[in-house]
Amino acid sequence: MTRDEIISRVSEKVRVLRAEVGYTQDKMADIIGVSKKTLVQIEKRRVQAGWSTVVAICALFRETETIQFLFGNEPLEVLETVAHEGTDYRKEKTLGGKVWWREVAGLADLLCSKIS
């Protein structure tokens, strides 16, 4: 799935999503950070939502049936993968140097025991 496909799919479902959560156009526009005029244009399919608006919609309404239907149980994971173009951007978690210091302490104990 590409960024453009995600934008298209979410833009097509904005009205359905708004109805599902029971918001007015004013309330929905305020929540997702667009003007009411822009929201109306998206709902009437005159324009498509921007990427940041789509991300906001998916993040804020990830538990709704509409978003779950579009992207499955983990919509944010789908967006992250597409946003980072399929690369694994997450770094492997470390113990913040704890392992290294534990090894240094172990070596110090070993050296001290050999010296004595």
Image (cartoon, grey):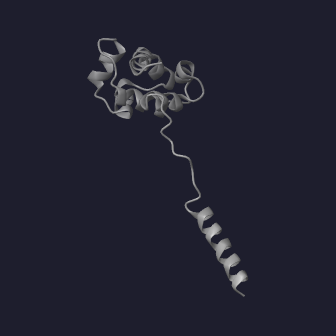
Q: Where is residue 59 in the image (x, y as percent from the top left)?
A: 47, 33
Q: Is residue 13 above or below residue 92?
A: above
Q: In which quarter of the image is the C terminus?
A: bottom right
Task: State the residue in front, 50 or 5.
Answer: 5
Q: In which quarter of the image is residue 72?
A: top right
Task: State the residue in front, 79 or 54.
Answer: 79
Q: In the image, what residue occupies the spot 51% across and 42% down?
A: 90
Left or right: residue 23 versus residue 37 is right
Left or right: residue 40 versus residue 72 is left
Q: In this view, does 19 lie above or below 96?
A: above
Q: In which quarter of the image is residue 35?
A: top left
Left or right: residue 116 versus residue 72 is right
Q: Where is residue 86 in the image (x, y as percent from the top left)?
A: 48, 28
Q: In the image, what residue occupies the spot 57% across and 54% down?
A: 94
How many numbered marks have been drawn onto this rendered protein structure?
A: 0
Q: Residue furthest top?
A: 45
Q: In which quarter of the image is residue 39?
A: top left
Q: In the image, what residue occupies the spot 39% across and 25% down?
A: 24
Left or right: residue 53 versus residue 74 is left
Q: Where is residue 80 in the image (x, y as percent from the top left)?
A: 47, 32
Q: Which residue lies furthest to the front in this view?
A: 115
Q: Residue furthest bottom?
A: 116
Q: Is residue 50 above or below residue 110?
A: above
